Image: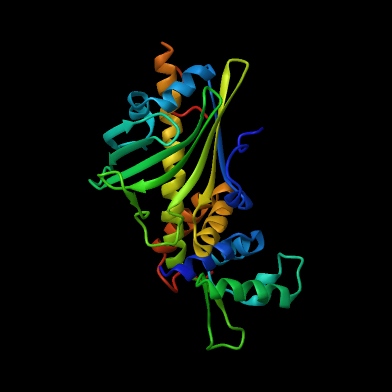
Amino acid sequence: MDARKGSPAPESMDRPFVIARAFDAPRKLVFEVWTQPEHLKQWFSPKGFTVLAAKMDFRPGGVYHYGMRAPDGKDMWGRWVFREIVAPERIVFINSFSDESGGLARPPFPEPWPMEMLSTIAFTESGGRTTVTVTWTPHNATEAERKTFDAGRACMQQGWSGTLDQLAAHLAGATQGAQRT
Amino acid sequence: MPADHLSATFAALADPTRRAILARLASGETSVLKLAEPFDMSLPAVSKHLKVLERAGLIARGREAQWRPCRLKATPLKGVADWLEHYRRFWEESFDRLDDYLNELQGRENRHGRKKR
């Protein structure tokens, strides 16, 4: 696939994080629901989140700015700055956390995660089904941020986080010393 | 958690042998000798893995006994898990909703209910 063709070089040295899913719908429709805010509002947020705002200027250089409220009442803002639009094949944008006024914001956790991510969303159709492939590469990241991304990528890709969570929960519930077998 | 610490935790978890060691330690503290048993690996090789895990703050090793028992430390694990979970959940759940939404747009009932994957 040529999804990364046309992207500038420096960040392509990093190995990307890739996530893909096939949907039972034609490519034209899937592309539309990814690129129109009234559609995105309907699905682009985890369960239990309420969409606060979704404003899009869909052209290279344009911005999609969105906000959502978590079930615990915390607000989260994000933005995409479009770089490349090839309907209905792919969109390329710089994804980051944002604030209410659309500025660039740090991720809401203390760890050194890249502030900006070059995201390529590729749409391929086969037999009436459309596969969406999301590819992430750190953009303008520091050495420490890239290292965290690289290590985190391996963990996310291997589905290790679920296992880790169970392990941590198991440990949290266990009293020290009562554990010996 | 400090920046360096998190990178060390991730790096430590990227290796399958080290993950197996952690899983083993989840059922209680044990010695290096015992830990090495299921692996086709020399003791120095296992010790090297343990050092990485110790530096990452994922395990603690007793000084009291000569056999230096290894035990799991939960805190860094919890930090990493919460954080990665955030990303995983965002995409998984958004994709689930997209699947339902596309069915709805095409005039299909979500006949298979919410969790067909």
Image coloring type: rainbow
In the rendered image of this protein, does residue B54 appear above or below residue B20?
below
Where in the figure is residue A174, as x and y percent of width and height? 42, 64
Extreme-front residue of the structure:
A61
Q: Is residue B73 visible?
A: no
- Asked whether, in this view, residue B95 is left or right of residue A48, the answer is right
Query: Is A126 rendered above or below residue A121?
Result: above
Which sits in the foreground, A73 or A101?
A: A101
Residue B47 in percent (x, y) is at: 67, 76
Percent of width and height locating residue B41: 75, 69
Residue shown at 36%/24% (left/top)? A39
Query: Looking at this view, is A23 or B71 the one in front?
Result: A23
Picture residue at 54% right of the left edge, 75% below the top:
B55
Seen as rendered, the residue at the extreme left is A73
Q: Position of residue A118 (x, y in %)?
A: 50, 44
The quarter of the picture where residue A100 lies is: top left
Quarter occupied by the N terminus of chain B: bottom left
Q: Which quadrant of the view contains residue A34?
A: top left
Residue B35 or B49: which is nearer the viewer?
A: B49
Asked if residue A154 shows in the view, the reply is yes
A34 versus B109 height, above or below: below
Q: Give the number of callouts.
A: 0
